[in-house]
Image (cartoon, rainbow, N blue to C red):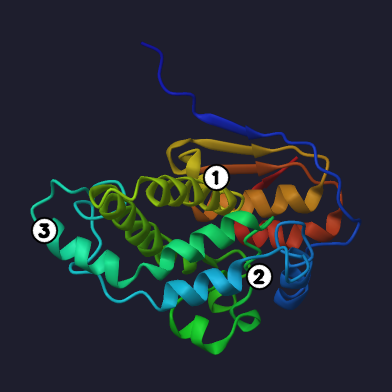
Amino acid sequence: MKSKQSILCFCILLVGSSMVFAGPREDVIKELNQSSSVASSDGASSWKQFFEACIEITPPPMAMSDAFNMNTVWPGMSSWEEVSTWAEQNEHIEVAFAEAAKRAIIGLPYGSEHVPANFRDAGVYAEIGVDDRLHAFDFAYVEMVEIACLCATAEMYRLFENGDYDRAIQLMISEFIVLRKFCDREFLKSENIQDVDSFIAVTENEKTNLIAGMLAKHLGVKQSIIHVVNTEYMPTIKEIGIGAV
């Protein structure tokens, strides 16, 4: 049997600006926040209203784990009565997912300084440059998304049990749509990037290559190689420990 393919090539052809990505943290975050997955009018992004609702979720009846998450919760579980009660207490999450599904993007900005203080306190941020290391990431918001999805999934099952099928189906659809929107930032994780031996980024956009290479390295890829021409990238590339061609 052939072994699993050990090289993942990131070859999407993108066209971006000519700005250089090898600057201070503030410049990097500014550039990232001008990307199409973040920059938008207030009416097109959902991050504020969605995470405000997430912050209001009360603690679940037990800690999230491999045995208790959105993939394992269901009416047949031993603690379903407590979980169902918790879901009902937090049924506002149904509206949060429905509204987020209607908008074009999530749009959570990069940099903890670009979200409200209560978001930072709740761990809702996508940090770049942790401990003054430009290539260090902390996407802390992912845990909040996991809790929200757990709550929404439990609420969906509760609605089905109560015979409220239309609401349950609509919540299920909204949850899928919102999760897909979050995948824009989690695309490498979804490909199990940590399991490959080598990652090669060869798009036409050098900033895209650098960002992808940085994230792959952060996620544990043994060898990350990117295509760059601009020599101003080299100090950052050397610091991160990725290869350049």
Q: What type is the residue that disc 3 sits on? A: Ser
The answer to whether residue 129 is visible is: no
Q: Is residue 40 left or right of residue 47?
A: right
Q: CA distance from mark 2 to mark 3?
A: 37 Å
Residue neighbourhood size for the residue with mark 1, other residues' Cα within 10 Å, grouped as few (<14), some (14–19), many (≥20) = some
Vertical order, 214 against 114 (above or below): above
Tag 1 near tag 3, CB within 8 Å: no
Q: What type is the residue that disc 1 sits on? A: Leu
- Upstream in the sequence, badge 2 or badge 1? 2
Mark drawn on residue 109:
2
Residue at 61% x, 59% y: name it.
240
Compare residues 168 and 245 and report the one nearer the observer. Answer: 168
- Upstream in the sequence, badge 1 or badge 3? 3
Vertical order, 139 against 168 (above or below): below
Residue at image mark 1: 188
Which element is circle 3 on? loop
Q: What type is the residue that disc 2 sits on? A: Pro
Q: CA distance from mark 1 to mark 3?
A: 34 Å
Residue at image mark 3: 79
Position of residue 110 measured from the top left corner of the image (x, y, whole percent):
64, 70
Please tell me in which quadrant of the rendered image residue 214 appears: bottom right
| Residue that extends furthest to the bottom in the rendered view of this protein | 117
